[in-house]
Image (cartoon, rainbow, N blue to C red):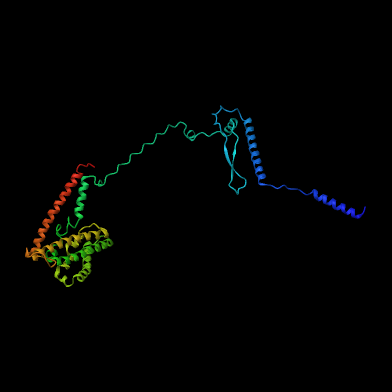
Amino acid sequence: MPPTNRKNRAVERKKEEQGDKTVIIPQITPEILEQRRRDAANEARRRAAEQLQAAGRNAPPPPPPAPKPPANTSKTIRIPRINRKTADTRTVQMPPVTPEQTAARQTAAPPAPPPAQQTAPHTAPQPKPAAPAPAPAKKPEGSHRRTLAEAQSELDAHVTHEHIALNNPVMVRGLGLAAVVAAATDGDNALMLSVAVLMLLTFTRVLAVAVCHLTGNRFRPVIYCYAAALCYIPTYLVAYNLFGNDLAVLGIYLPLLVVDPAVLKRMEFDELESVRHAFRLGINNSLGVCLATMLVGCLRELLAAGTLFDRKILARALLPVAGQVSGGFLIVGLLAAVWLAVRGMYVEYKKEEVSRLYGKRKR
């Protein structure tokens, strides 16, 4: 045999051997993968059903038949797909559960007794909780004063702490009469005296209370006296800048305000008030003194000269003695009498009103 043919046969034999080793791999499509997953799920369900049937054959006789389940006993289970990248789920219909399978499950895991039977099998039934009490009715406005005594006490406190009219320091309590009778001879003098009293009385009380808080409410008389003396200096400077040399008309009665009872009366009380409360009551007392001082000064000028702040009001003077000290005592006494009469009528009216409104209340 020629060498050429032998060589060709060897080449052909080698090609045949290589052709026998070639494997053709079919292309896998998504439909094929989905069919494989369905087959695997069906196979798993079939094996589970076989196991349940085998357990039912080996179980003891079933107990009395349970109530029939509804016609449609199929359950719907949402099984996620194998591919976790997608959130697609599919619904699979489970086969109906037979009575044998239900009996087998009950035999395998008997139900536990309820907690009440485990702890106390013969306990008596607990009583029902009592009904909640009805909410109290809302009280009308102004019903916080429930008794006559409380209403009268509140009225007395109001009369005591109202220093402008009901408990005026000059007309009711008789404080500061020296300066009012001797210095408040006309409207201008009364105005200068009122400004001085307003500043001196208010700031003396505030300063004294602040120092008493630091000393533990000790040495009250000394503190009030020194506080009035210290506050008099800025008071005089402010009044001098406002009225100039006319301030000298007040004479000795302006510095006498430092020791006037209207300024130092508070030192007799041991109760220590707050600085804010002291400022409010100081303003209240000062306004009461200013009101009485202006009323006395204007009335005396009108009766003695027929003028008011140097403006002609009456054609002639009705009571010239009103400009003197004796006339001052007379005017202040008459005003105080009228003031107390009106105050008494008002207080009696308020007490009768309180008795009418709260007299029949037992609580």
Q: Which residue corresponds to the image point at 65% horizontal and 36% vertical from the top-left?
A: 46
Q: Decide if residue 278 is on the left or right side of residue 256.
A: right
Q: Which residue corresponds to the image point at 19% horizontal and 47% vertical from the top-left?
A: 354
- Horizontal and vertical percent for residue 195? 19, 65
Toward the top, the furthest residue is: 64
Q: Quadrant of residue 210?
A: bottom left
Toward the bottom, the furthest residue is: 245
Where 255 sits versus 23, above or below?
below
Q: Decide if residue 288 is on the left or right side of residue 29.
A: left
Q: Decide if residue 219 is on the left or right side of residue 61.
A: left
Total residue callouts: 0
- Horizontal and vertical percent for residue 282? 22, 60
Q: Quadrant of residue 230?
A: bottom left
- Horizontal and vertical percent for residue 308? 13, 65
Instruction: Evaluate whether residue 223 shows in this view.
Output: no
Instruction: Evaluate whether residue 206 shows in this view.
Output: yes
- Horizontal and vertical percent for residue 65? 56, 27
Q: Which residue corresponds to the image point at 92% horizontal and 54% vertical from the top-left?
A: 2
**Depth order, front residue of 157/54:** 54
The quarter of the image holding the C terminus is top left
Where 100 sits versus 342, above or below?
above
